Image (cartoon, coloured by chain):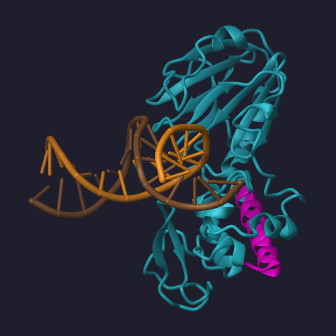
Chain colours: A cyan, B brown, C orange
Amino acid sequence: MPELPEVETTRRGIEPHVVKHKVQSVAVRQPSLRWPVPADLPKRLKAQTLLAAERRGKYLLLRFNKGTLLVHLGMSGSLRVVVKNTLPMKHDHLDICFDNDKCLRLNDPRRFGAVLWAGENPLAHELLDKLGPEPLSDAFNADYLFTKSRKRKTSVKNFIMDSRIVVGVGNIYASEALFAAGIHPKRAAGHISKARYASLVTEIKTVLEYAITRGGTTLRNFLSADGVPGYFALELKVYGRADEPCVKCGAAIRSITIGQRASYFCPHCQR
DNA sequence: AATCGCGCCTGACGGC
DNA sequence: TGCCGTCAGGCGCGAT
């Protein structure tokens, strides 16, 4: 499942191949994603130049002359570069082909992803305008999390996975960061000290930055290359390790459900 | 305002 | 072998 590091790796991977190039053709094979792909997308994009590939949270923002295409990879999506006329495989729903004979190709088996047209000011789009700060920005710090969390009864894990609080912290990295910070995932967000939030902020930044670094190792071959999720290269310390020994203390890692999602933690190291 | 649970969708996997 | 149930999960949305 693409988390922020995978989306950032995708952004960096496609950028050198398609930015500054003009759209020649668009093929929509399966418009039924999370929301319908706009029927007029081919007409809209035709002859427009891709000016920049940006990211906000887990959304890719493809900026063209006359507006911005929002792309979300959902949980099974990938966007990669293929040479023109490469035969589409199963679940290759969309191609945007450019004047250099390269195409952006969206593959998404579960179709939780989205492709939407956002006009000139994409950050004002209703899907983006309530998003919290980027986790790797200075705006995401202990003071911010502490202030936002006061009187909040929800679990700290739900809290940091809320995109209105901070974007890009998915289920895997939430468990990993809470383990690194020694915080129990079910602890009420409003009952955590500023010092502990400082630790959590540091660990969230560290795990995301490290995963981006790992993703970066695949960028040179991004064209037609298989994507390797950042967490693949990470040594996950708790996620998916139920009943296995904690790497710090040896206690059995536990699996519980928080907000309908699997959560993993060490009952000895996390309080 | 905050919180909770639902459902979109396919593929992997286990049991029979 | 094949079928069927279950699980996985980002995230917007409606209900409370």
Residue in the image at 71% along x and 33% along y = A126
Please state which of residues A145 and A13 is positioned toward the viewer in this rendering. A145
Residue A39 visible in the current orientation: yes
Q: For the view shown, which residue lies furthest in the right direction?
A: A138
Task: Residue A39 in the image: state x and y as whole percent.
Answer: 58, 13
Residue in the image at 74% along x and 25% along y = A118
Which of the 4 quarters of the picture holds residue C13? top right
Q: Is residue A208 magenta?
A: yes
Q: Please tell me whether the stretch drawn in magenta is mainly helix, strand or loop.
A: helix
Say if B2 sits above or below A22 in the image: below
Q: In the drawing, does residue A112 fall left or right of residue A214?
A: left
Task: Residue C4 in the image: state x and y as whole percent.
Answer: 18, 46
Residue in the image at 58% along x and 92% along y = A249
Query: In the rendered image, which quarter contains the C terminus of chain A?
Result: bottom right
Q: Is residue A101 magenta?
A: no
Residue range of the region highlighted in magenta in the rendering: A192-213
Residue A232 visible in the current orientation: no
Residue in the image at 49% along x and 81% along y = A253
Task: Residue A38 in the image: state x and y as whole percent.
Answer: 60, 17
Q: In the drawing, does residue A116 fall left or right of residue A255?
A: right
